[in-house]
Image (cartoon, grey):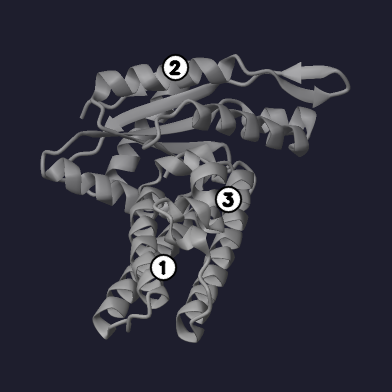
Amino acid sequence: MPHFTTEELQSTLQQLEQAIYNHEQWSKAFDRTLICRTPHDERDVAEDAHCRCQFGRWYYHQAPNNLRDVPAFRAIGAEHQIMHQQAARLLLSAAAGQVVSTEQYDVFATALERLRLEIHSLKQELSDSLYNRDPLTGAESRKGLLGKLREQQELVQRGVQNCAVVMMDLDHFKAINDMHGHATGDRVLVAATRYVMDHLRQYDRLYRYGGEEFALCLPGVDLEAAFKATERLRKGIGELVVEAGEGTTIRVTASCGICLIAPNESVEETLDRADRALYRAKRNGRNRTEVCEG
């Protein structure tokens, strides 16, 4: 899933709900035309009928750009076009006075059902992503972390790719809350999270682990690449300027610990190794990244 903010996910789900409603209205009108033998809409028998219905207009012209990177969204396009091709055949047969065979209708019904399944899959994926988000920062919540790491560990065990785990903690965060208040602390958390999410690859994941501590899952990298990527994030966080009210601003730094997922240990042990590297970074002066080699 590409990186969406909570607001973007909510808006996208609302758009999808409207698109689903429009599709179901089209389906009802199609059934009425076929059963009652009323004149069909010429747009439904055009070669590009899949682009002319209201669902198609949303899909091709109005859907958010970052949604187009979601595999479930792309799968909808193919099934939607096939469904419209089968619908056009039925409408043209009926208009020519031919009897629509059960075989013809079953082909259309199967295409329609496959489209509905793809749409449901996309809606479920977006809903899961929305409701598994930390409400303050928009990062994914901790409860999805272990499952994601276990998925990656299976790939590591099969030799498909490496995967790095990064534990990241904002330095002296309690002092920020004590000196500037929790509202400012929240703004710091949101700013740091937004920066990290904006600078991750599409398939990287950021989880709020607890308080001011975050976990990152970086698939397909070795320790050197993970270190370089984490250092870029750490330095970027250090350059953020956050409004603290009454014309004052504050900066924040982060400490990070990195390790690779090992094929023969639990993902809990992997997190523990990354956490130990994080605490070594704090002991060594904070605002730095340490790597767990073992």
Secondary structure of residue under mark 1: helix
Reading the image, the residue beneath label 3 is: 12
**Residue type pointed to by label 2:** Arg
Q: Find the distance from the CA under tag 1 to the CA under tag 2.
A: 42 Å
CB under 8 Å between callouts 1 and 3?
A: no
- In this rendering, is residue 250 above or below 16? above
Question: Which residue is more in the foreground, 234 or 194?
Answer: 194
From the top left corner, tell me how far across and down residue 110 is, in percent: 30, 73
Question: Which residue sits furthest right?
Answer: 246
Reading the image, the residue beneath label 1 is: 116
Nearer to us of marks 2 and 3 is: 3
Q: Mark 1 Cα within 10 Å, few/some/many (few <14, many 20+)?
A: some
CB under 8 Å between callouts 1 and 2?
A: no
Q: Find the distance from the CA under tag 1 to the CA under tag 3.
A: 18 Å
Reading the image, the residue beneath label 2 is: 232
**Residue type pointed to by label 1:** Arg
